[in-house]
Image (tube, rainbow, N blue to C red):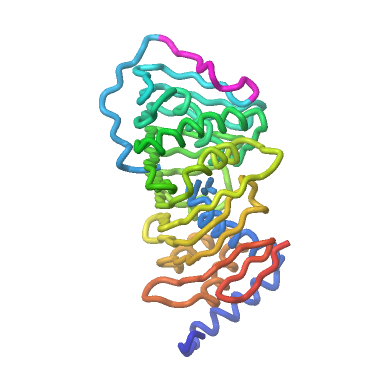
């Protein structure tokens, strides 16, 4: 394939993969693998999803001056979330919090962080910082709540005004832990830096020191991820509302992904492309280029964890991939429930 002759070992591997594949649901395991890759490409890991896929340059906090008692954030709607933190410093253009706790109603998720900073706003920095923590929790748990929509839209408009005024917004969290049911995600740091460049906003997103438990195939999930992307400034508020809210009419937020990377040990997934985000998985669309370095190790991890479906899907994905050095590549497109990989349409509905 691709002009390269198959060796007998590769042929045996292909035959073995096809045999394993025939014993499981064709549609189910392809969906599991490609939904995972699509999710990384469209959300940059914005959820273990986007969006895992917040920047290292924002991770240095400096010393935090802690107050003696927790402060209940007043601006967030009660039906959206409950937020407690200790407020060290809070002004129009900056906020520094410690001991943050964000809780969604009905056991829908909890986030804790040792510290959070925000700089660059032109007003209500503390409210924008709280909205950002709600977004981080929602992105990692896939939670949507209509009670959050209008509030997030309002805080997003503050962020848009700050970018339009030429400011650079920098957000950072340290020692983050997210829990929902059995899912537990911890991160040493998370950060986002975003600046306005004319009508577009350019952003860098980073997660570091990531550990995940309580879900399937945890050994396949990345320990770090980063992405550089851009979107129209006037669509930022809509994206914020769509990430954690539930709008009656879904927005269409146009994102260009310059680069994304997710790593674990010697395995690295990278890519670039475009996406139209709506806040809902099935109605989003995306196209781009994906590449995995050392996919063999990824397959071994899946086999060692008895993830038969994922292992078989990865073997088949390697068979249909293009080879580039020690990497395997795919050109992908997702639209209307159809995933096209290297020109081959795969209906997943």
Q: Residue 172, percent across and down? A: 37, 34
Q: Residue furthest top?
A: 68
341 to 190, vertically: above or below: below
State the image coordinates of residue 233 (x, y, percent, origin top left).
Answer: 47, 44
Q: Main secondary structure of the magenta part?
A: loop
**Residue positioned 51% across, 55% down in the render:** 40
| Nearer-the-camera pick, 311 or 32 | 32
Quadrant in the rendering for residue 61: top left
Residue 96 at x, y percent in the picture: 36, 23
Q: Is residue 260 magenta?
A: no
Residue 15, x across and y down, in percent: 60, 81
Q: Magenta stretch?
A: 69-79
Report the residue that reaches farthest toward the left.
62
> How many numbered discs, if any?
0
78 in magenta: yes
Q: Nearer the viewer, residue 340 or 306?
A: 340
Give the residue drawn at x 47%, y 56%.
Answer: 256
Left or right of residue 167: residue 26: right
Q: Nearer the viewer, residue 16 or 158?
A: 158
Q: Which residue is depicted at the point 53% across and 31% down?
A: 134
Q: On screen, 308 above or below 131?
A: below
Q: Is residue 84 above or below residue 328?
A: above
Q: Quadrant of residue 35?
A: bottom right
Quarter-of-image position of residue 287: bottom right
Give the quarter of the figure containing the C terminus.
bottom right
Q: Is residue 339 left or right of residue 325?
A: right
């Amino acid at each position: 394939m691709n002009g390269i002759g198959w060796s007998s070992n590769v042929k045996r591997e292909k035959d073995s993969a096809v045999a394993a594949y025939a014993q499981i649901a064709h549609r189910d395991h392809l969906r599991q693998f490609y939904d995972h890759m699509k999710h990384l490409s469209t959300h940059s890991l914005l959820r273990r999803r986007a969006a895992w896929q917040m920047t290292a340059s924002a991770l240095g906090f400096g010393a935090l001056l802690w107050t003696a008692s927790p402060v209940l954030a007043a601006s967030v709607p009660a039906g959206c979330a409950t937020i407690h933190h200790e407020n060290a410093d809070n002004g129009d253009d900056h906020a520094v919090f410690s001991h943050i706790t964000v809780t969604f109603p009905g056991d829908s998720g909890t986030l804790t962080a040792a510290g959070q900073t925000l700089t660059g706003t032109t007003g209500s920095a503390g409210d924008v910082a709280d909205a950002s923590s709600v977004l981080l929790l929602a992105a990692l748990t896939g939670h949507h709540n209509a009670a959050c929509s209008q509030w997030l839209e309002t805080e997003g408009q503050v962020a848009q005004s700050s970018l339009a005024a030429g400011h650079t917004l920098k957000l950072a969290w340290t020692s983050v832990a997210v829990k929902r049911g059995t899912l537990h995600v911890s991160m040493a740091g998370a950060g986002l830096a975003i600046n306005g460049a004319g009508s577009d906003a350019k952003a860098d997103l980073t997660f570091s020191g990531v550990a995940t438990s309580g879900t399937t195939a945890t050994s396949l999930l990345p320990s770090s991820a980063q992405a550089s992307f851009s979107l129209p400034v006037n669509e930022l508020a809509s994206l914020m509302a769509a990430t954690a809210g539930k709008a009656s009419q879904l927005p269409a937020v146009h994102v260009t992904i310059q680069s994304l990377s997710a790593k674990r040990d010697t395995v690295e997934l990278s890519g670039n492309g475009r996406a139209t985000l709506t806040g809902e998985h099935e109605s989003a669309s995306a196209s781009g280029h994906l590449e995995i370095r050392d996919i063999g190790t990824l397959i071994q991890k899946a086999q060692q964890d008895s993830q038969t479906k994922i292992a078989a899907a990865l073997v088949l994905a390697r068979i249909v991939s293009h080879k580039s050095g020690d990497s395997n590549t795919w050109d992908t497109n997702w639209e209307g429930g159809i995933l096209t990989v290297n020109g081959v349409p795969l209906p997943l509905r």
